[in-house]
Amino acid sequence: MTAPIDPRQFFKPNPQTGVLKALDHEAFTLRIATIGFILRSAIDLLGAGALAVLREAGRKAGAGTYAIIAKQQPSTNQELLFLLIEGDALAGWGRYRFEHLDHERKEATIVVENSFVADAIGSYPQPVCAFLAGYFEGFFSALWQCSVTCEEEVCKATGAPHCRFRLSS
């Protein structure tokens, strides 16, 4: 298995310029409460329209993350997914675990513990992790070189212990 990612190599802050880099790409941080105010306000005001925008933004972010990780030249899909899981955990996005993964059939089930989206929004009557669903669609569409759809089957915001996403081509 690949060695753990050293956060000092993953994150490189520059206090003089005020720029934070993650894998040599500009990044920034927000408190979970702050992103929660933004996301909950958008969903409360715009409803399904906000979720559609978040999903599309997630697709673009996921495809971009795939490109960044692919530049690290992982030797196997297992190593590539390790970099996704560990990098996103270091960034505070939550902890991903595959319940099912089949590269040949192009399908997966991903459990997300401590989803930053669900934790930020808090209790909500419907699934709210449209950004993460889109993120997984974008990432796995790039990995598998086909169109992938992702359904959030379970969401922590609705009272479940975690979020679960089902991907298929």
Image: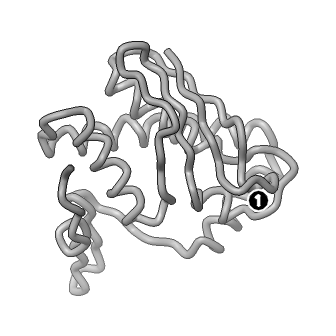
| 141 vs 6: above or below | above
Could you say whether the residue bearing mark 1 is in a helix, strand or loop? helix
Classify residue 118 as left or right of residue 57: right
Which amino acid does the dot numbered 1 rest on?
Ser
Viewer-proximal residue, 108 or 73? 108
| Residue 67 % position (x, y) | 26, 37
* Res. 7 image quadrant: bottom left
Please tell me which residue is depicted at 59% across the width and 71% down the height of the picture: 32
Classify residue 148 as left or right of residue 45: left
| 139 vs 103: above or below | below
**Number of residue marks:** 1
* Most distant residue in the bottom direction: 16
| 127 vs 156: above or below | above
| Residue 31 % position (x, y) | 55, 75
Residue at label 1? 41
Viewer-proximal residue, 133 or 31? 133
| Residue 69 % position (x, y) | 24, 44
* Most distant residue in the right direction: 125
* Res. 165 image quadrant: top right
